[in-house]
Amino acid sequence: MKILAFAEQRNGQFKKTAFEIVKAAKTIADKINAEVVAVVVGNSIASIAARLGGYGAAKVIAIEDARLELYSTTAYSKVVAEIAKQESAEIILLPASELGKDIAPRIAVKLQAGLAAGCTALVVENGTIKATRPVFAGKGLLDVTVTTGTKIFTLRPNVFTAGDSNGSVAEVEIRKIELNETDFSVVVKEVKASGGKKDVAEADIIVSGGRGLKGPEHFTMIEELAGSLGAAVGVSRAVVDAGWRPHDEQVGQTGKTVSPSLYVAVAISGAVQHLAGMSSSKYIVAINKDKDAPIFSVADYGIVGDAFEVVPAITSEIKKMQSK
Amino acid sequence: MKILVFVNHVPDTETKVKVAADGKLIDPAGVNFMLNPYDEIAVEEALKTKQQFTGEVVVCSLGGETNKETLRKALAMGCDKAVLLKDAVIRDSFAVASGLADYAKEYGAEIIFFGKQSIDYDDAQVGGLVAEMLGMPSISVVVKLEIKDGNVVAEREIEGGHEIVHSKLPAVITTQKGLNEPRYPSLKGIMDAKRKPIEEKSIVSVASRVEVSALRQPAAKAPGKIVGTDASAAAELVRLLHEEAKVI
């Protein structure tokens, strides 16, 4: 049996999820006696493909086509579905990234497969994969099984750990899939990067500021703390609604769902909409004046105090630690 | 233009999740339901599209009798007509999408709007499923949309930036916050909505492909450690993050 692992790349670089997906596939494969075949779609990507061997891919299929340099919903989904068919893959894993969430339903329809989306856990019980997915803004967890012959799972980024590569190199096969004009009915023409800043959806550490900071000018100290940690800056909805910061930094419902190793919430009360987007973080630090703020109910460490004094002190302590 | 917008009737964000007796569904007792927030953006965009091209906006929802409240809200915002695809059973995304796709085809929609995800089951998959079932282009997580002479140029939000996406009508668009500011229904809108028709249709039942074995509440987190009450706690916090949590 084969498990197909979709390894997402952009600009010829693997996303962190690529390794997470391959590793998660390998973990399942070991329990059901299956083999992991990874698929990479893009242009000039064959050279990076072999690395996936270090995370458990027995083989990597690279689909190279100049027209696939930029993402196309229709073409990418066709390619992955075709490879799944050619490989007779019974299980397909994709990241629940903006690209993965975009192609997974199309692949599911093409393959007549059931799809469990945004999973945070996969376990094998009696040979069956049981998936867990957060629902109702993280206030519920749904345990599900997919009942079709071909099963698709999308996995929430940053939840499944890839660990380190074991150094193995996978066999890479460059394969051609016929694509015609109609396969490109949706195409990306241009990607606008958000000024090189780290995105909350991909960061390993996030420092977020809330309305308690009283104004956009006070985000300098958030940026400084984030800078000292190599972290992304996040914000609560109130901050975006007030026009202090852009929407692409918003964490929570109507913003982004994140699962970093460390989430520092500064002057954020912790409305349920915010908790929905960050409560699966591995460690949460809350800094808030109000000891009754709901954010403390999910925090591992808290400082009940004035952010304007506490945050600069933390930044200087981190710098002190780093200079040792 | 024939404009279709699909909306979902979802528990209010503030809802406390109580598991129903069957252990698989949410107990609806005491839960306030509302128009899914992302679908509000979809309705607004549908109405703006009508302003640009004339035509009609049909709002459609799949579910039980109570979904009519959400349809009324969309009618009050300005949709012309509502359709309720009646289905008392809660199904997976695939079964829902299949009911919606059948109706979209029957109606002959030229553009279909969805919210980017529904905040109950948070699948974010139904728009893509419907598009593929209809063989239509789709653009998800859209924060900017321009339609001209049947050509669609949209901006979609991705990790670390935005993609500029080109396509053609008919197409499926799923909407993200930032695309527009949904209007509040006017008093006149609310009065008019009472007179607008809600057509009821039955759907061809399709089996779910994802089976729920349990809905659980996440384990409550053990209370965290309050490290201190002022800046003097900073050093201890940094030590804990470095030595105990090992995350920095």
Image (tube, helix red, strand yellow):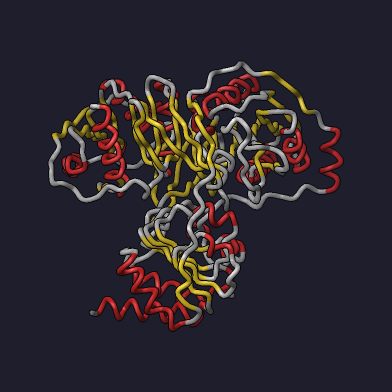
- Name the residue furthest top: B204
Image quarter of residue B1: top right
Where in the figure is residue A266, as x and y percent of width and height?
Answer: 50, 70
Viewer-side residue, B204 vs B240: B240
Measured along the vertical axis of the image, is residue B161 above or below residue A147?
below
Q: Is residue B25 left or right of residue A173?
A: right
Viewer-side residue, A102 vs B14: B14
Q: Quadrant of the N terminus of chain A?
A: top left
Q: Is residue A300 left or right of residue A215?
A: left
Measured along the vertical axis of the image, is residue A181 above or below residue A158?
above
**Res A65 seen here:** no
Measured along the vertical axis of the image, is residue A270 above or below residue A124?
below
Q: Quadrant of the C terminus of chain A?
A: bottom left
Residue name at image x 42 percent, y 35 percent? A131
Where in the figure is residue A221, as x and y percent of width and height?
Answer: 45, 77
**Res A306 seen here:** yes
Viewer-side residue, A18 vs B18: B18
Image quarter of residue A207: bottom left
Q: Is residue A286 left or right of residue B31?
A: left
How many numbered dots are placed on residues in this image?
Answer: 0
Residue name at image x 21 percent, y 42 percent? A55
Where in the figure is residue B6, as x and y percent of width and height?
Answer: 63, 33
Where in the figure is residue A28, as x and y percent of width and height?
Answer: 29, 34
Residue name at image x 51 percent, y 77 percent? A307
